[in-house]
């Protein structure tokens, strides 16, 4: 029986999501409007299929589009809003840039340069890549920009160390760079979209200004440093492997850079500078990536040829990302996210003088809200409720606002985080690999990191 459950666990969970959706439609709970019931049912099935991977993710997205339109759950502008989102065009730009990096040989050249510094044990490779991801979080404000830039290089690094497709080592290398540059970045104020949404809403709604230094000191030690260490440990445990030994003298021996490599290198430097300086020019990372892609495709430049464009671009990624964004738009449009968040908060055992219970409850509520709204939606839904929470708990509004960060930095399912989704699609790795690591990391956060964070906040005088 146990073996059967283990073998068919994905099918069982997918079927449970269908049964749950049917029960929701039949029971018609009074707390939800008819359109919210339809939205919740479709969201449950879609998320269940994405989480289990029972069918390819892009087909699940197409099924979502079809059912949402057939049952008129939202307007076409909302359902297909993902295709007009900057994230989709960032993915497209990243796919073209990735093809260029691999086809020109520049990826191999960069990988060899990095490999000289990571040469040695698997531990050194994984920890070095996670550190690289964290360092890039200080340099580039856009998590999706970092993923788009670093993922093709990580693929070349995996090839360098002999980690072929389907091996645990390749999965480990790619998860190290994708998760390493996204999850720890929540402790760095401008390094992720949810952080920036929280900054803007805290300023406009409560006139609370969140500063870089205090934010870093409050969140970085646990949310960034400890989680980065845990990511290294979990990858070594879940995806152990051994790199192929290579003679150091042979590493980095390359012919002079070709014309295509030189053009691509210049283009990447320009894009990197534009991504790093977005606080000056305010151009979205997506349009920088799209501009770079158009340049690489342009006749006369022709770094990515027509045949490569038709055959090597992973178009399924576009539909997958558009589906995730469309689902988020549909949930927000229906008001389901706000309703669920309000109901979750109403059930919390919070009150004055219960600092630990308040801390844990609000953090959990924020994390659970992210399942319905995805991570960028948490501050948009939760921030307007912060004043009520502050009055109920007797805590300062600034403290309540900061508790959100612990919740939306906890990625329970990868679909909640567009940068992870983009990275996994660019890498060609199985979505379930990231799902397993995220689930274990979320469990460790709930059991151990929350209490550690509580005492750290107490020490700093935030509670």
Image (cartoon, rainbow, N blue to C red):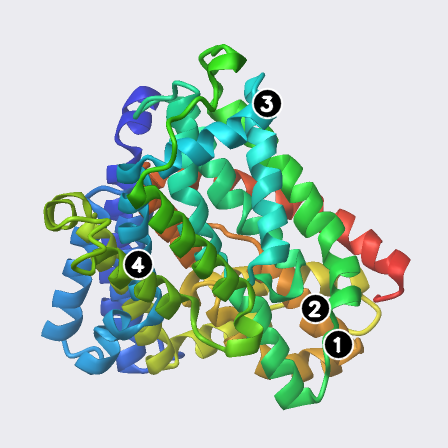
Quadrant of the rendered image containing residue 159: top left
**Which residue, given by chain and number where applicable, does mark 3 sit on?**
123
Pinpoint residue 317: horizontal percent, then vertical percent. 25, 52
Compare marks 1 and 4 and give the one earlier in the sequence. 4
Q: Nearer the viewer, residue 238 or 252?
A: 252
Regarding residue 423, the answer to whether it shows in the image is: yes
Tell me the mark number nearer the camera, choosing from 3 and 4: 4
Compare marks 2 and 4 and give the one earlier in the sequence. 4
At mark 2, the secondary structure is: helix
At mark 1, the secondary structure is: helix
Near mark 2 (Cα within 10 A), the count class, few <14, some 14-19 or many ≥20, is some
Near mark 4 (Cα within 10 A), the count class, few <14, some 14-19 or many ≥20, is many
Q: Nearer the viewer, residue 164 or 271?
A: 271
Mark number displayed over residue 402? 2
Q: CA distance from mark 3 to mark 1?
A: 39 Å
**Which residue, given by chain and number where applicable, does mark 4 sit on?**
93
Tell me the mark number nearer the camera, choosing from 1 and 4: 4
Name the residue: 45% across, 45% down. 150
Name the residue: 30% across, 43% down. 259
Tell me the mark number nearer the camera, choosing from 3 and 2: 3
Near mark 3 (Cα within 10 A), the count class, few <14, some 14-19 or many ≥20, is some
Compare marks 3 and 4 and give the one earlier in the sequence. 4
At mark 3, the secondary structure is: helix
Q: Are dots 1 and 2 in contact, CB under 8 Å?
A: yes
**Which residue, given by chain and number where applicable, does mark 1 sit on?**
398
Q: CA distance from mark 1 to mark 4?
A: 38 Å
Quadrant of the rendered image containing residue 216: bottom right
Lateral position of residue 276 relative to residue 300, left or right? right
């Amino acid at each position: 029986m146990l073996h059967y459950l283990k073998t068919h666990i994905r099918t069982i969970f997918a079927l449970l999501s269908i049964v749950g959706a049917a029960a929701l439609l039949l029971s018609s709970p009074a707390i939800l409007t008819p359109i919210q019931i339809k939205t919740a049912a479709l969201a449950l099935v879609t998320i269940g299929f994405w989480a289990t991977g029972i069918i390819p993710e892009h087909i699940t997205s197409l099924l979502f589009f079809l059912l949402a339109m057939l049952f008129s759950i939202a307007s076409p502008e909302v359902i297909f809003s993902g295709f007009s989102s900057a994230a989709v065009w960032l993915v497209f730009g990243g796919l073209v840039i990735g093809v260029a990096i691999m086809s020109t040989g520049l990826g191999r050249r960069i990988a060899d340069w990095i490999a000289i510094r990571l040469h040695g044990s698997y531990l050194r490779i994984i920890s070095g890549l996670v550190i690289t991801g964290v360092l890039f979080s200080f340099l580039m404000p856009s998590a999706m920009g970092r993923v788009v830039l670093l993922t093709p290089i990580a693929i070349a690094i995996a090839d360098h160390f002999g980690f072929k497709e389907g091996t645990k080592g390749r999965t480990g290398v790619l998860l190290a760079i994708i998760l390493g540059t996204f999850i720890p970045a929540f402790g760095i104020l401008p390094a992720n979209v949810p952080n920036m949404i929280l900054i803007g809403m805290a300023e406009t709604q409560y006139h609370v200004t969140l500063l870089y230094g205090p934010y870093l000191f409050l969140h970085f030690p646990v949310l960034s440093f400890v989680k980065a260490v845990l990511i290294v440990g979990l990858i070594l445990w879940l995806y152990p492997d051994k790199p192929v030994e290579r003679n150091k003298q042979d590493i980095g021996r390359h012919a002079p850079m070709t014309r295509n490599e030189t053009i691509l290198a210049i283009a990447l430097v320009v894009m990197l500078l534009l991504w790093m300086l977005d606080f000056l020019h305010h151009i979205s990372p997506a349009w920088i990536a799209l501009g770079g892609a158009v340049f690489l495709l342009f006749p006369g430049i022709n770094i990515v040829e027509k045949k490569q464009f038709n055959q090597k671009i992973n178009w399924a990624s576009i539909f997958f990302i558009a589906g995730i964004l469309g689902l988020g738009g549909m949930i927000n449009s229906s008001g389901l996210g706000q309703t669920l968040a309000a109901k979750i908060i109403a059930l919390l055992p919070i009150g004055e003088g219960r600092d630990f219970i308040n801390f844990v409850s609000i953090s959990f509520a924020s994390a659970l809200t992210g399942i319905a709204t995805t991570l960028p939606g948490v501050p948009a839904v939760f921030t307007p409720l912060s004043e009520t929470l502050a009055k109920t708990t007797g805590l300062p509004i600034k403290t309540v606002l900061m508790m959100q960060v612990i919740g939306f930095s906890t990625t329970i399912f990868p679909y909640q985080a567009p940068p992870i989704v983009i990275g996994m699609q660019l890498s060609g790795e199985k979505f379930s690999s990231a799902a397993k690591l995220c689930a274990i990391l979320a469990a460790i956060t709930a059991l151990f990191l929350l209490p550690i964070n509580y005492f750290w906040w107490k020490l700093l005088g935030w509670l």
